[in-house]
Amino acid sequence: MTRAHVPPQELTAFLTRIREWYATDHQGFATLFDAAIANIVAYPADTPEQIRYDWRGKSIDDLCDFFAEWYEAGWTTEPSQALDYIEKFSWITYGNDYGMVFVTCGPGLAMTADFTRIQGLQMDDEGERGQELIALWTRALGSRMDDFAKGPWPSFNAFFTRELLDGSKRPIDAPQDNSVVVAPTDCVINMIVDDLAEGTPIPVKTVTMNVRQLLGNSDYYKKFVPVKDADGKVIQPGGTAVSCILMPDTYHWYHAPVAGDVVEARDDIGGIYYGMRDFPQLFNRGNVGHGFDYEMFDNFRRGYLVFRTVFTDPGGEEHETYVAMVTVGLNSIGSVTYRPQFRNPAEPVPVKKGEKIGTFRYGGSLTILLFQYGRFPALQLHMGQRIGTLEQRDRTERLFLGHRHHGPGHRPVAL
């Protein structure tokens, strides 16, 4: 039996604050919460029991109890359960525009940001409970831990961002060939857009993406969107986007996908912490991220880097091209942290392929790679390279498989 734990002062203050916000309708907090609850869409009938939570008819006291329970569960959550409370919370926004507004605007956004901060403090705890959680994950990961340097780790977040044992565990392919792009992290990869749009999102194969906003209004967005002539006619299509989604129990450092120079970088773009209209769709029965509406990620807490690289084609001709990597902190995470040399550099920073860029702490996360038109037409592998692993069913069912019934994905909206 899990021993009782008295919520820390930070959590107690947080729960007191949102109760007061509700009582006074602070900046419309009560109005937005009540509207969200009044418009809850029931989760699919085949939803697994462990991620069910019916928000219909819930009160502010229920919301506070949920946060307190979520915090307490954080001390005993193993890898296969890492997404459970995120999914339970996501039923507020499932098919629910009012729920989307509640968690992505005003005091609701402040609420989710503050709870994320408190979870970060919890995962940084250097006491006995943090060590117990590390031990739980270490046992659950079993031989997966063989790839990593051994502890001890002072906190769970230190464990979560653990280093690889040595470079041989993730050898960098073709380090001297700049035409070869490597995976930036351990991830599930999907081609998500093959004709990136300009400032206003335009649907492409069920996916839309605001490249300018995704890159924090950087002028480099122009490298990845269509080129037009003086009359506004498109003379060159937009580029390609690839998603690289991290699972909770894998390696959480991200690395440079190409060699060259980092010509621009930021790791401090603020944004929302929750607000997926259909979070289970992201897992898509194991084909993680395929067909998902990525447009919302240009509003999430994130950073980006723009790489300039020069590669030589088989005929010996050199080509310069640009690659962008957007690092997105998703649900239950507020940490998008780059190494010092990649934080808002004033001058281009040389980088090697596979060089460490930064890390995500505990929570959901992904990177999005952007390529210029015609430079990255498809995922291409050589014989003998890893394309995946055979899995035990419990990990597959808990971390990869979503539900069969999905609603359309949407951006946060204003009502």
Image: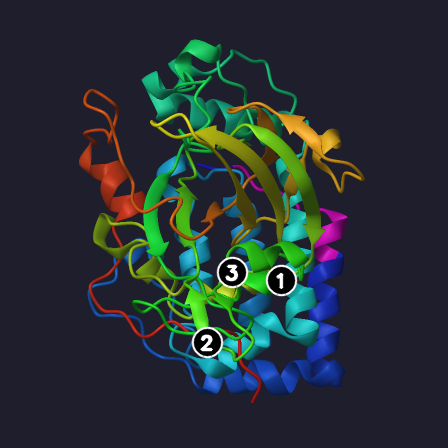
Q: Quadrant of the C terminus?
A: bottom right
Q: Earlier in the sequence, mark 1 or mark 3?
A: 1
- Main structural element of the magenta stretch: helix, strand or loop? loop
Look at the numbered disc 3 and give the secondary structure of its residue.
helix
Q: Dot 3, crowdedness within 10 Å: few (<14), some or many (≥20)?
A: many
* First reached walking from the N terminus: tag 3 or tag 2: 2
Amino acid at circle 2: Lys
Where are the magenta residues, as a range?
Answer: 3-12
Circle number at residue 193: none
**Magenta region includes residue 9:** yes
Disc 1 + disc 3, Cβ < 8 Å? no
Q: Which residue is rendered at x = 58% and y = 26% of the image?
A: 356
**Residues under numbered marks 1 and 2 in contact, where contact means CB atoms less than 8 Å apart:** no
Residue 59 colored in magenta in the image: no
Query: Compared to 281, does 144 lie above or below?
Result: above
**SS type, badge 2:** loop
**Can you give x and y, in whole percent of width and height, for residue 101 in the image?**
56, 78
Q: CA distance from mark 3 to mark 2?
A: 28 Å
The residue carrying mark 2 is 233
Q: CA distance from mark 1 to mark 2?
A: 43 Å
